[in-house]
């Protein structure tokens, strides 16, 4: 776990924020036409949606000629160009975003001057096009996803710097006997894009599918608490916060029912909540009789039904607590990791799982980081 004081020392007390934006092979700071980058916003998520970075370029319009001087800034707005964003302080920075230019807007609005707004998306944005119907050579979803990223288009994206690498966790449907040859159960794509296929797999196994600084992850959710990223509090980088605990929608147990077609027999599995959700016993008493029953055609064995039930219970449990928090800008804060709120006392001192991060850098406000996080229990 990183220490806040170590980060404060690393970044020189967070005194002089810096930004490096590179589009293709061009660094924005090296532009020769006095272009101004007024602000940048990087929205990161470990959910199924794509992460994005948006930046605004000024001093692009010649008032005397009454037109944009396109040749001066075209290198920074070309659609499809690779984009990297690094943030930090002083001479120290960390990469927070890797993607490609997805959208360019030329804007003049009341109260504002002519400028260009550029939106970059991570690699997911290019995976949403196309539709395929084919049988994969892989016999499980994890290997099928790796098979997708071996296609020439993704090798080209990798070469051009739109993403750096792929890390895929094994899925529960992977055989453990070493026999993974194609069978009647070989994975198929049915009139869907690569993105839709991977999202389907993520929902099926309750996995995360996201991109972190150019690394594409397909992995099990909610890493163990010993992997807590950082402790934060009012004297440790926090500017303001909102912590909410809510028991509506929680259930005592989840039951998944399926059908073993080979034996023509029903299979089922039950998972019960074990998390602490109150400093007393009234909350659990209120949800003690609440149960969710799910019919899942994909659960063809008791083991698969149990895994599905565990996944659903985890998803429900993490609706219990939410944290919205503004912090001093810290590149280390990223989705897909736990953080701990400290020194607030009582239920506020808790462990939360970051689901979204927004890094904002502007000439007026400096560098700030906003996080959205969730908790399944009180510690």
Image (spheres, helix red, strand yellow):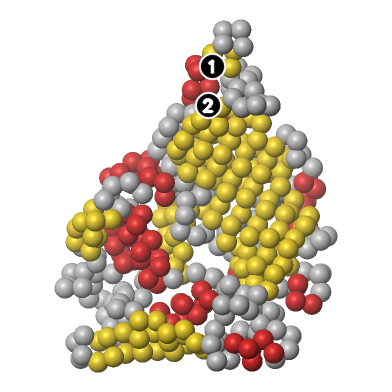
Check the image and report above or below for 342 versus 307. Answer: above
Per the image, label 1 sits on a secondary structure element best described as strand
The location of residue 95, given as percent across then percent down, is: 58, 45
At horizontal 50% and vertical 60% (from top left) the residue drawn is 47
At horizontal 28% and vertical 69% (from top left) the residue drawn is 140
Towards the viewer: 349 or 92: 349
Extreme residue in the front direction:
110
Per the image, label 2 sits on a secondary structure element best described as strand
At horizontal 52% and vertical 45% (from top left) the residue drawn is 52
Tell me whether the residue at label 2 lies in contact with that at label 1, contact meaning CB atoms closer than 8 angstroms: yes
Check the image and report above or below for 198 versus 297. Answer: above
Crowding at mark 2 (Cα within 10 Å: few <14, some 14-19, many 20+) = few
Q: CA distance from mark 2 to mark 1?
A: 9 Å
The location of residue 270, given as percent across then percent down, is: 44, 89
At horizontal 45% and vertical 38% (from top left) the residue drawn is 102
Check the image and report above or below for 96 versus 343. Answer: above
The location of residue 269, given as percent across then percent down, is: 40, 89
Residue 267: image quadrant is bottom left
Check the image and report above or below for 67 versus 230. Answer: above
Would you name the residue on which mark 1 appears?
68
Crowding at mark 1 (Cα within 10 Å: few <14, some 14-19, many 20+) = some
Towards the viewer: 168 or 81: 81
Would you name the residue on which mark 2 appears?
106
């Amino acid at each position: 776990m990183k220490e806040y004081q170590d980060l404060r020392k690393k970044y020189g007390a967070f005194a002089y924020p810096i930004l490096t934006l590179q589009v293709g092979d061009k660094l924005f700071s090296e532009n020769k036409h006095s272009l101004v980058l007024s602000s940048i916003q990087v929205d990161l998520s470990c959910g199924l949606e794509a992460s994005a970075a948006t930046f605004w370029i000024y001093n692009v319009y010649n008032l005397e000629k009454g037109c944009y001087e396109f040749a001066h800034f075209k290198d920074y707005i070309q659609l499809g160009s690779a984009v990297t964003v690094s943030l930090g302080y002083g001479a120290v920075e960390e990469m927070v975003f890797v993607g490609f230019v997805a959208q360019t807007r030329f804007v003049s609005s009341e109260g504002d001057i002519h400028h260009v707004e550029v939106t970059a998306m991570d690699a997911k944005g290019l995976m949403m096009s196309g539709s395929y119907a084919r049988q994969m050579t892989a016999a499980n979803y994890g290997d099928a996803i790796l098979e997708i990223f071996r296609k020439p288009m993704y090798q080209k994206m990798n070469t051009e710097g739109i993403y750096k690498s792929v890390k895929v966790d094994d899925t529960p449907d992977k055989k453990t006997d070493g026999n993974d040859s194609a069978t009647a159960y070989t994975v198929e794509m049915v009139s869907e894009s690569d993105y839709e296929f991977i999202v389907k797999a993520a929902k099926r196994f309750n996995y995360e599918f996201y991109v972190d600084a150019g690394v594409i992850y397909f992995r099990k959710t909610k890493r163990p608490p010993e992997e807590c990223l950082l402790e934060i509090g009012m004297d440790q980088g926090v500017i303001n916060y909102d912590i909410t605990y809510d028991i509506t929608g929680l259930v005592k147990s989840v039951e998944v029912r399926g059908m073993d077609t080979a034996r023509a027999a029903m299979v089922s599995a039950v998972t019960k909540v074990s998390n602490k959700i109150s400093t007393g016993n009234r909350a659990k008493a209120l949800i003690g009789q609440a149960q969710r029953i799910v019919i899942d055609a994909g659960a063809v064995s008791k083991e698969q039904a149990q895994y599905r039930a565990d996944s659903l219970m985890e998803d429900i449990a993490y609706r219990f607590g939410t944290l919205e928090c503004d912090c001093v800008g810290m590149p280390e804060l990223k989705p897909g990791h736990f953080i701990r709120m400290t020194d607030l006392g009582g239920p506020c001192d808790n462990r939360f799982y970051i689901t979204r991060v927004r890094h904002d850098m502007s000439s007026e406000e400096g560098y700030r980081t906003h996080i959205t996080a969730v908790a399944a229990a009180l510690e």
